[in-house]
Amino acid sequence: MNRSILLVLICFALSTTAMSNFADTTVVKRSYTTQHIQGTVTLDGIPNEEAWNSVPWSGDFIQWKPNEGKAPAQPTQFKILYDEKYLYVAYHCIDKYPDSIIKRMDRRDQFPGDWVEINIDSYHDQRTAFSFTLSVSGVRGDEFVSNDGNNWDVNWNPIWFAKTHIGETGWTAEVKIPFSQLRYGNEADKTWGIQVTRRIFRQDEMSTWQYIPQNSGVWVSRFGELNGLKNIPLHRQVEIAPYVTIQADKYKKVNGNPFATGFDSRVTGGLDGKFAVTNDLILDFTVNPDFGQVEADPSQVRIDGFQNFFEERRPFFMESRNIFDYQLTGSEAGGDYDSDLLFYSRRVGSSPHTSPTLGNNEYVKMPQNTSILGAAKFSGKTRKGWSIGILESITEREMATIDNSGDKRKELVEPLTSYFVGRLQKDINGGKTVLGGIFTAVNRDNGLNDLLHRSAYSGGLDFFHTWKNRIWYIRGNVVFSQVQGSKTAILNTQTSFEHLFQRPDASEVSVDSNRTSLTGTGATFRFGKQGGKSGKHGRLFKFETGITTRSPELELNDIGFMLTSNEINHFTWAGFHWPKSFLIFRQARLNYNHWSRWDFSGKFIYQGFNFNSHATFNNNWQTGTGATWAVFGISNNALRGAAAIKRLPGINHNFYVTSDYRKKFYVNFNTNTFWGFQRTMKNSNSELTLYYQPINAMRISLSANYSYSWRKQDQFVSNVSYGNTLRTIVGEVKQHTLRFVGRLSYNITPDLTLQYYGQPYINRPLYNHFAYVTDPMAKNLNDRFHVFNNGEITEKNGRYEVDEQNDGIIDYSFSKPDFNFVQFRSNFVVRWEYKPGSELYLVWSQSNTPDANGDLEKDVALPKSLFNNAFDNQAARNIFLVKWTYRFLK
């Protein structure tokens, strides 16, 4: 702990010196004055209509990278007009070598090839903006920018129009943006913030209209200004999008199972919509949503007890999710702690929490996911700086149907549930200070009272303050949670993996079987520097330090995501960043991190130090490497409720390299290895990805990933009763994982795409040298366990039987933990946006999770087991889906 405090003081001293030397470089704020359109504009990508002559071209762009501050290789110009409904933008991207313009295509929001972009701060709050990107090939990209450029949300998908044209002097474009897609106040004479950026792909060069130094650490607050917008009517966005889905499932028929006939079909419908309550506050809603076109989750298996985290992919929950983003800490804290969220939208509509126990000759029809009856989202930002977000979703009461020789019964597997999230933030002093709060609630109907919480609430208050030209900042939040339920449900929470109140060495907690609620708290406070004066070769010093706490009773997993509780984490990150080109580098970074951790009893449980470096060379190759020294570690949850166990220290090394991504063929390779001292463990992971663009309209990627994990003796297997004592069984484990991922994207037009995703996956942990824990905190690894000898343990019918006394009487037994998990998932999607906002999807999904455990007995090699099982079409489930949406606009 003393070393951690010393390092914090050193970083603070360095940062204080940097602050005293900071001198802001004055940058002139540019402005552009638009006019109301006189005449008409035909959107064909060639801005030669008479109407464009009423406003001048603006140019004089400045390189942003790689040679910041210098003139760009090719000049860029733009014009802006408006009428009562639209904002019009014309671009002239001058290029002396038009044959060299890169015209790559990809799906929306992938930003391929050469492009030009306008960011519009129509709130003029200097924190948020709407971004519209157009590639020379006609592919559109759009993002909602928040947190002064530190968050770019590609899931915002407005309706707008654009065309491009390549000519002798380069390429031109015309863009038409409906005012209904923007948010602004009702003042008669408006001033908006704007920024225009161009990328020249072949030179990997970006230039901007408004120069914003990279050492500023900000974006939106330094935009130029758009003037001349007068008397724009308020446009209340109204969009209604009904949909119809036709789905057919084909799978292997199971004789005798009335629910597995080999073929199912269904027709469903629903409704999505948007309604502008005011010009800056939007109500989004969905009734009976269907997400059949969404790409399948990657296969994941963990044996360490922690939950898997899956990214949100459903459009309704992805759009505007930045408003509801409330992390207990940030990624700077290291490890998995950036995943702690008060709102994790994947909880809504997840798989049912339970399944029925079947008797002989019984078959079950289980819902794969909980049906979302409807959801509504109210979000936006007012002219006075209030950001508002409210989300409510209701999920269906789900029943499993059980058949016993023709007699059917139903059993509850998920109760009717309400999910609520409310978020409020207030910008003060132009966004230099932000105050906010959040509240979440889950309320469940009766039915599974001994399994699930009846209700779960969480909330928090947060703040952010920046000063010295937005270079320095302090931010933090405090959170609380309360779960309520039956005595059994609360007892299950106390003894769950995230809490483990039953640990015999946990002086700070204890199990109380009479409790009907738990109340927890947490907090994060961070102080840092994100910009400042540049040193030699444009060097910047940045840092952040802070602390995060999670009390033992904190519980977020009803609507949020939390890996564990009962921790106090200190973290510090400091680094030098060279954003400008120098010597052989286009840019480079050197970083230092350290982490320290305690539990709420005051016990020191982790210390780690890290150094990492990253560089992009002048030939556009990228590489990086780093090392982490895990000095000390104790795990409170590795033994699943038994005593804490000491982890021996070790060293981790990582390395990656990526060749020039501008080429039609490029490669990425990364590897990560951890070596435990005293030869106690080894984890390694290597991945190779090949990218190929044979033509501008097609992109192919293939990746192979292999990981190997070996723990000498301390991998948890089971907790079993032996007389009046608890035996914690552990063993040596060797876990092999092999994954291949293939992707193909083909654009017939910018609005008609074909996409394929396929992933075969195998995970095989093999256990040996079983033992039980005797002294988990012993200094020497071998002193922590009693390893069973051949006379004490025997395998029989998939179980291990233990006779500790060697008297011929079985004292206890446990299941054989080995398994061979194989899975194949794929999606083939044809997406056609036949008119703006209206889409037709043709989808073929295939999934196969065969029983491959028989390969363990035959000792089948890992790759052979994978390919023998993953592509067994007879066992696969094929889903064919057609989804049609039509968007009505006002």
Image (tube, helix red, strand yellow):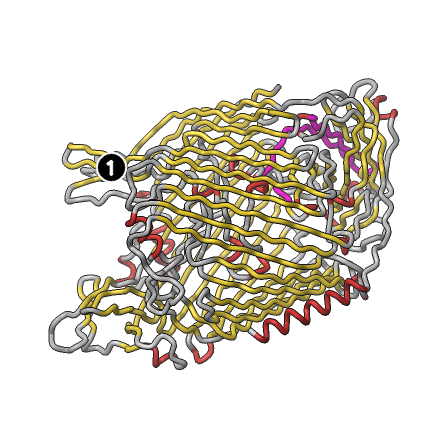
Task: Name above or below for residue 321 compared with residue 682.
Answer: above
How many numbered circles are shown?
A: 1
Q: Place residue 614 in its image quadrant.
A: bottom right
Tell me the residue that label 1 is attached to. 411
Residue 500: image location, x then y, percent: 36, 60
* Residue appearing at x 57%, y 20% in the figure: 888
Q: What secondary structure is found at the residue carrying circle 1?
A: strand
Q: Which residues are magenta?
A: 152-179
In the depicted view, which residue is nearer to us: 153 or 476? 476
Give left or right: position of 661 versus 287: right
Q: Note whether residue 759 is visible.
A: no
* Residue appearing at x 68%, y 51% in the figure: 465
Position of the N terminus, as image quadrant, is bottom right
Give left or right: position of 429 versus 793: right
Task: Name above or below for residue 548 compared with residue 115.
Answer: below
Position of the C terminus, as image quadrant, is top right
Q: Which amino acid lies under the numbered mark 1 shown in the image of this protein?
A: Glu
| Residue 831 lies within the magenta run | no
Residue 553: image location, x then y, percent: 42, 55
Q: Place residue 144 in its image quadrant.
A: top right
Q: Note whether residue 676 is visible.
A: yes
Task: Name above or below for residue 685 compared with residue 343.
Answer: below
* Residue appearing at x 83%, y 28% in the figure: 228
Residue 627: image location, x then y, percent: 58, 70
For the stretch drawn in magenta, the main secondary structure is strand
